[in-house]
Amino acid sequence: MLDKAKYIFVTGGVVSSLGKGISASSLGLLLKKRGLKVCNVKFDPYLNVDPGTMNPFQHGEVFVLDDGSETDLDLGHYERFIDKPLTKENNVTTGQIYSTVISRERRGDYLGATVQVIPHITNEIKNRIKQLERLGDKPDVIIAEIGGTVGDIESLPFLEAIRQMGQEEGPGAAMFLHVTLVPYINTAGEFKTKPTQHSVKELREIGIQPHVLLCRSAKDLSDELRQKISLFCSVPTDAVINAPDVPTIYEVPLKFREQGLDDIVCKQFGWETEKPDMADWESMVSRIRNPKRQIKIGICGKYVHLRDAYKSIIESFVHAGVHNDAEVKLIWVSSEEIKQSGADKLLYDIDGLLIPGGFGERGVEGKIESIRYVRENNIPFLGICLGMQCAVIEYARNVCGLSDAHSYEFYRDLKHPVIHLMADQKNVTDMGGTMRLGAYPCIIEENSRAFEAYGEKEISERHRHRYEFNNSYREMLVENGLKLTGVSPDGRLVEIVEVSEHPWFVSVQFHPELKSRPTRPHPLFRDFIKAAVTYHEDHSDSAKPETSEQTDLSQAH
């Protein structure tokens, strides 16, 4: 344990979506492997208090933490790379900052003062960073990622706050890492450094001189190009780090390690630590790049054209694939297309199907039809949240004979609402942060696929939902072969359902993808892929070529 935490501030320039979150996560992993206690935090410049009410097309996946916080998807990267559960303090938004300052002003805390961005907003931002030192296991280093792009108006208070911290904490207490783009212009046949130069110029005008540049590019930059960037940006050449596109994000820490990024950080802060042992990580990356087999998993949802909406699910399949020595090729199928073209045309060549979580009635009938197809054809199935609810509706309709069974979420006047509003949600009016959120315990029946996967009777998983299995239909569904293999400790809430006469059909109300890790895949994803591998091997001789409809709708991850 070091006496005082050091700070690493990660900014981005030129364009968005350069991978600041992956960069911050990769550096966190390297420093953790050196025996340091690492804390990652994300600052988002939007005025929403959290991303919970945003459309996935606007923001991508909402990553839910154990404490019930709805956070940015980059916190998923943090947890996966440093393998540490985070809390609400690890994601801060402009909405939270302004809400706190305005509440204090109304209380009279600033009585007599004119409340301004500087110093009141910037002081609160600095306080949010510094409070991480005082929470729980005191970190040796805090890696703070500033959302947005240098030059954005909304990011300016955060940049000013970290500039002040760099000055106030004194030499050797803070580092600035800038993620930038070095584009390759095909018509000119060369890389261009001018965007990086201008991005660093904007930082300097604010008063920030980066210590390290992480240069994103299509491929490695030459030493000559790195020297040019070094000269024009006043950054040592060895601190101009290549960050080229790689086949898997889990290769990024290895690329940074090859170039000594963690050595540069340790030298800056005067740390003397052991070199990181990356053997397990290298083995994992090698297995990703050299799988023994390939299987196809269908993902049927309504956000299939925006992969970030299912980021944790995608990564969970990578982790589970590594464990099973398999490349998991994801076949993205729009649930609305299923309704138009039929499940038999779009899903006949898959080795397993996943129905993810979601909200709203659009595409639900396509999901239900997809579930019917894989249930009747003994294809492995995993349903998550809404996916479980659709599985219950499908079973009630096609096995129990309740043809008009549906969810109360979509239709209020129902004869058979097999999915209903949770009792504690009936008087809820605010939309933000009011669902059943965060970690809750579940008791698993021993004679079940779920118990085979987990190997224990009591588990804890993260939730994000308002609607639940309607207990009025428990007896009927169980009598017709649906197994309720996981329930809350008081027995009131159904958490896991399975089909007893199916090779592998498991649906869960929670979100297992949020707890999967690269070197420790989630048990349900691990066993789902294992079942899909078995199905593939049993049916490989009779496999059919892809249809044009499937080819048009599919894309490998």
Image: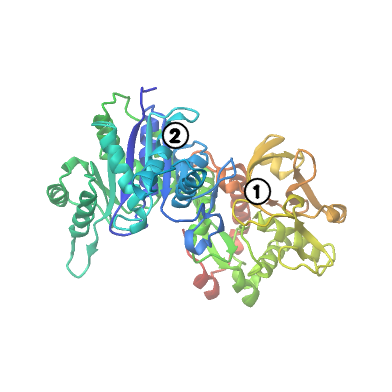
Find disc 2 in the rendering and name its residue: 132
Residue 290 in view in this figure:
no
- Label 2, secondary structure: give it: helix
Binning the other alpha carbons within 10 Å of mark 2 as few (below 14), some (14 to 19) or many (20 upward) gives some
Which amino acid does the dot numbered 2 rest on? Leu
Quarter the N terminus occupies: top left
Q: Quarter of the image holding residue 374?
A: bottom right
**In the image, is residue 185 above or below residue 513?**
below
- Vertical comparison of 321 with 367: above or below: above
User: Which corner quadrant of the image does residue 338 belong to?
Assistant: bottom right
Mark on residue 319?
Answer: none
Q: Position of residue 45 (x, y in %)?
A: 41, 53
Q: Position of residue 50 (x, y in %)?
A: 51, 52
Viewed as shown, does residue 58 lie left or right of 5? right
Residue type at numbered disc 1: Phe
Total tally of numbered discs in the picture = 2
Q: In the displayed structure, does residue 496 sit left or right of residue 260? A: right
Q: Nearer the viewer, residue 408 or 331?
A: 408
Q: Which residue is mark 1?
A: 510
- Residue found farthest to the bottom: 340
Q: Is residue 500 left or right of residue 48?
A: right
- Mark 2 vs mark 1: in front: 2
Colour mapping: rainbow
Name which residue lies at 44% across and 40% down.
81
Alpha-carbon distance for marks 2 and 1?
A: 29 Å
Front residue of 360 and 486:
360
Q: Residue at x 84, y 62 (%)?
A: 400
Q: Nearer the viewer, residue 307 or 464?
A: 464
Residue sitting at x 75%, y 55%: 426
Secondary structure at numbered mark 1: loop
